[in-house]
Image: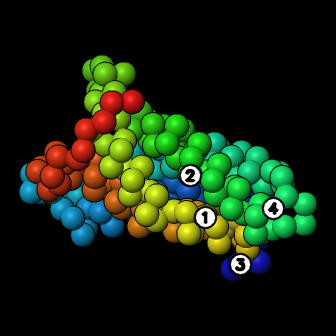
Amino acid sequence: MFASFNRIITKKPLVTNMLTTGFLFGSGDLLAQSLFPSETQKDFDAMRTLRLVSYGGIIFAPIGLKWYKFLGALKPFKERNMYNAIFRVGCDQLLFAPFVGIPMFYSAMACLELNPNPLQEARNKLDRFWWTTLRDNWTVWPAFQYINFAFVPPQYKLLAVNLFSIGWNCYLSWLLNGSKSGLTQEPEQIMI
């Protein structure tokens, strides 16, 4: 099975990553709905899962693939893989996560939820969740990304992130949807 996947991801990296990313984002939401059901939600919310699948497959996968390719090309330290990996983690966690990844997620969710005023809703979500998400991101991702950048072959970096992200996507889904039913305390407010 791994040999088949390797052949497909080498021949069609974008399509393969879009399908796997969408599937794994959806898996995170399924996990969130199973483990942390909302008091107001009686049944499984298929549209919620579809939004996460759509975001993961259509929005995040192409951008993530380009981002990891770009990071892979950054080699400021000649013949020092450890230092290059640390540099890439820094770029990922200090540039991409706070200014691209997290804002992109909450903005896309505001649009995919078909809110009447998606720009205002995106702003509300960012005001409410940006700092909490970024702070929690920094407790989980740097160590994983170091391993990813130092040891995982380039064609598998996004897949490694996606597999690790099942738990992270569960958290994002819970944070985004759990707060509607009072499951979370009010996240810290911060203006960006």
Q: In the rendered view, tell whether residue 27 sits above or below residue 122.
A: below
Q: Which image quadrant is residue 10 in?
A: bottom right
Distance of mark 4 from mark 1, alpha carbons? Answer: 22 Å
Q: Earlier in the sequence, mark 4 or mark 3?
A: 3
- The residue pinned by badge 1 equals 145
Q: Which residue reaches farthest right?
A: 78
Of 92 and 33, nearer the camera is: 92
Q: Residue 22, position in %: x, y?
A: 52, 54
Q: Give the CA distance from mark 4 to mark 3.
A: 12 Å
Mark 1: which amino acid?
A: Gln
Q: Position of residue 54 (x, y in %)?
A: 47, 45
Q: Residue at x 76, y 46 (%)?
A: 70
Residue 168 position, x and y percent, is: 42, 61
What residue is disc 4 on? 10
Residue at 68% in and 62% down = 86
Separation of disc 2 and disc 3 at Cα? 30 Å
**Of the image marks 2 and 1, the number of the one nearer the N terminus:** 2
Question: Which mark's residue is nearer the viewer, 1 or 3?
Answer: 1
Q: Are marks 4 and 1 in contact (CB under 8 Å)?
A: no
Residue matched to label 2: 93
Numbered disc in front, either 2 or 4: 2
Q: Is residue 73 among what the camera can see?
A: yes
Question: Which residue does the numbered mark 3 point to in the structure image?
Answer: 2
Pick whichever of labels 1 and 3 is earlier in the sequence. 3
Q: Which element type, helix, strand or loop, lies under badge 2?
A: helix
Q: CA distance from mark 1 to mark 3?
A: 22 Å
Amino acid marked by disc 3 = Phe
Q: Residues within 10 Å of mark 4 (few under 14, many from 20)?
A: few
Q: Taking 171 as reference, is 189 left or right?
A: left
Marks 2 and 1 close (CB-CB < 8 Å)? yes
